[in-house]
Image (cartoon, rainbow, N blue to C red):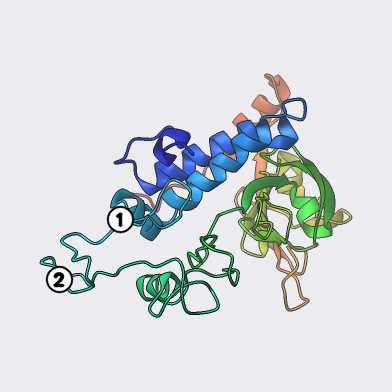
Amino acid sequence: MRDPYEVLGVPRGASAAAIKSAYRKLAKKHHPDANKNDPKSAARFAELNTANEILGDEEKRKQFDRGEIDAEGRPRFQGFPGGDPRGRGGPGGFETHTFRTGGAGPGGFGGGGFEDILNSMFGGGASRGARPGGGTTFEFDTGGIALDLDLSVTMTVSLEESVRGVEKRVRLPTGKELDVKIPPGVVAGQQIRLKGQGETAPGHRPGDLLITVNIAPHPYFKVEGSDLRLDLPITLYEAVLGGKVRVPTLGSPVELSIPKNTSSGRVFRLKGKGLPKPTGTAGDLFVTTRIMLPDGNHAELESLMQKWRDLHPYNPRSDLA
């Protein structure tokens, strides 16, 4: 197998984030599901996974850089520098051994044979699966390499969909599409985990799919925790004379009584018309009035206001410095 740095196309000094990013980009490109007509895609994908198993694990990466494991993650046998073929400690302080492939013992090794030596070298985890009398076939247990097979995607829902729940289709980085049920009451930033829906790799448990839910901005509601805020336009005559106006909610519209002489910016509280809470109750809807004048110039309205100004002058800014 090629050098894992070469496989992922990153320099030896690359950061962990750069390695992860390179792997995800290449894995998406070479995934067999996205290259069904390319018989070599599975081999390339397996090579990418092996490279990521080494470079994506800090300890394994250090072992590879020191030459302790090869490009497939297998321990390298480097010999014993300064060894003495008679089995005594050499000048470098390492114990040396003479390997014998025949003689006593059911495995074809003499006392202190190859299997015992490997066990002492690799903490008892080596030579797993050696066959009695089978000679030199060994499987090295490297302790398992953590491989990040999780997939992360974002999904945007409307405010109404977040309250009622919805089923939507999401496209994964692998190209696969999945129908996902978003539960009622989901909040912005909430993460939903679907086990086993992530990426796959030979010899590894499938990863999970992590869906982060975003809530799209609403055209007129503003979310504040479990409360909602709404700017409600009212006419000049509604503000002066009062009246009943329809107010939208996440459910059915309701009627709000506007008292006479209501100023712009006055806030009304509609209890229980906000977002549902985990406790089973709901937040409130706060409605702020905004007086809107008609478009265009109206001579009659201007004449009326001039008379009012002359007969009833007042200064709403008197408290300002």
Is 278 situated left or right of 118 in this image? right
Report the residue at 44% width, 66% height from top: 101
Q: Tell me where residue 220 sits by quadrant.
A: top right
Q: Secondary structure at mark 1?
A: loop
181, 274: nearer the viewer: 181
Amino acid, disc 2: Gly
Report the residue at 37% width, 76% height from top: 120
**Residue 65 visible from this viewpoint:** yes
Q: Tell me where residue 33 sits by quadrant.
A: top right
Residue 25, x across and y down, in percent: 55, 35
Q: Which mark is residue 78?
A: 1
- Crowd band around label 1 with a 10 angstrom C-alpha radius: few (<14), some (14–19), many (20+): few
Q: Secondary structure at mark 2?
A: loop
Cα separation, mark 1 vs mark 2, equals: 15 Å
Mark found first going from the N terminus, 1 or 2: 1
Q: Is residue 86 above or below residue 292?
A: below
**Residue 288 visible from this viewpoint:** no
Residue 54, x across and y down, in percent: 45, 51
Report the residue at 73% width, 58% height from top: 196
Is 204 situated left or right of 51 in this image? right
Report the residue at 48% width, 48% height from top: 72
Q: Is residue 89 above or below residue 202?
A: below
Amino acid, disc 1: Gln
Q: Tell me where residue 164 sits by quadrant.
A: bottom right
> Which residue is farthest front?
103
Q: Is residue 125 above or below residue 31?
A: below
Residue underneath mark 2 = 93
> Which residue is farthest right?
252
Residue 128, x across and y down, in percent: 55, 70
